[in-house]
Image: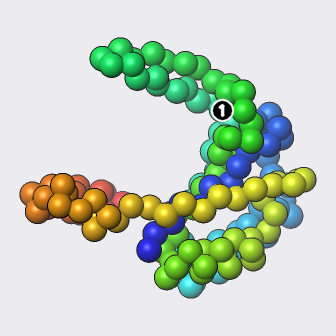
């Protein structure tokens, strides 16, 4: 199963504060463990929401809203994509993670949909299209 592991923002990440050298080294070591275990597929930190935008959809209308966004606790400072055997395994990995922020922090784990989750509506033609797109993405890496 694949999961997305979301590191929640705080006032410091939203202010653009960069992690110190100690935390960067600890996270680098943790990422090495994840890679060596075959768990980590992707991951990165994100700029503060002040550098982002949201696009709101209302029927055929699209409205662009510039950041920053208000609810800091609901924003994401970084993410990983992991391949694990179970949610329990993902939880165990997160428990081993260095605290990603200076104070209290929160990490959310969410399963990623797989093709079989979509049922009959995800027809063989749509599955072929999805696989073709994944192959094209992989070829460009």
Which residue is depicted at the point 23% across and 62% down?
A: 119
Residue at point 33%, 19% (across, down)? 59
**Residue drawn at (13%, 58%) of the image:** 123
Q: Does the image show residue 132?
A: no
Q: Is residue 128 above or below residue 13?
A: below
Quadrant of image for the N terminus: bottom left
Q: As rendered, which of 47 and 63 lies closer to the eye?
A: 63
Q: Is residue 73 left or right of residue 130?
A: right
User: Where, by quadrant of the figure, is residue 97 drawn?
Assistant: bottom right
Query: Which residue of the protein is positioned furthest toward the bottom in this rendering?
Result: 37
Residue farthest toward the left in the current orientation of the protein: 125
104 to the left or right of 115: right
Across the whole image, how many numbered discs are drawn on residues?
1
In the image, residue 111 sits, relative to residue 104, either above or below, namely below
Question: In front here: 105 or 67?
Answer: 105
Q: Quadrant of residue 17?
A: top right
Residue at x-position 18% and y-position 55%: 121
Locate residue 61 relative to residue 73 in the image: left or right: left
Residue 21 visible in the shown view: yes
Looking at the picture, the colour scheme in use is rainbow
Question: Outermost residue, right direction?
Answer: 103
Q: Position of residue 62 (x, y in %)?
A: 39, 17
The front one of 108 and 21 is 108
- Which residue was labeled with disc 1? 49
**Residue 67 pos. (x, y %):** 63, 24
Secondary element at tag 1: helix
Task: Pinpoint residue 39: horizontal percent, then vertical percent.
Answer: 53, 77
Residue 86, image x and y in percent? Answer: 52, 79
């Amino acid at each position: 199963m694949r999961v997305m592991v979301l590191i929640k923002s705080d006032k410091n990440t939203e202010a653009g504060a960069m992690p110190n050298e100690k935390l960067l080294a600890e996270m680098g070591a943790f990422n090495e463990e994840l890679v060596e275990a075959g768990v980590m597929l992707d991951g990165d930190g994100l700029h503060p929401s002040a550098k982002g935008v949201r696009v709101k959809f209302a029927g055929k209308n699209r409205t662009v809203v510039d950041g920053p966004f208000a609810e800091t606790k609901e924003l994401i400072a970084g993410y990983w994509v992991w391949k694990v055997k179970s949610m329990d395994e993902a939880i165990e990995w997160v428990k081993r993670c260095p605290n990603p922020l200076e104070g209290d922090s929160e990490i959310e784990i969410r399963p990623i949909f797989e093709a079989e989750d979509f049922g009959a509506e995800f027809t063989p033609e749509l599955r072929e299209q999805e696989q073709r797109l994944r192959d094209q993405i992989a070829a460009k890496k």
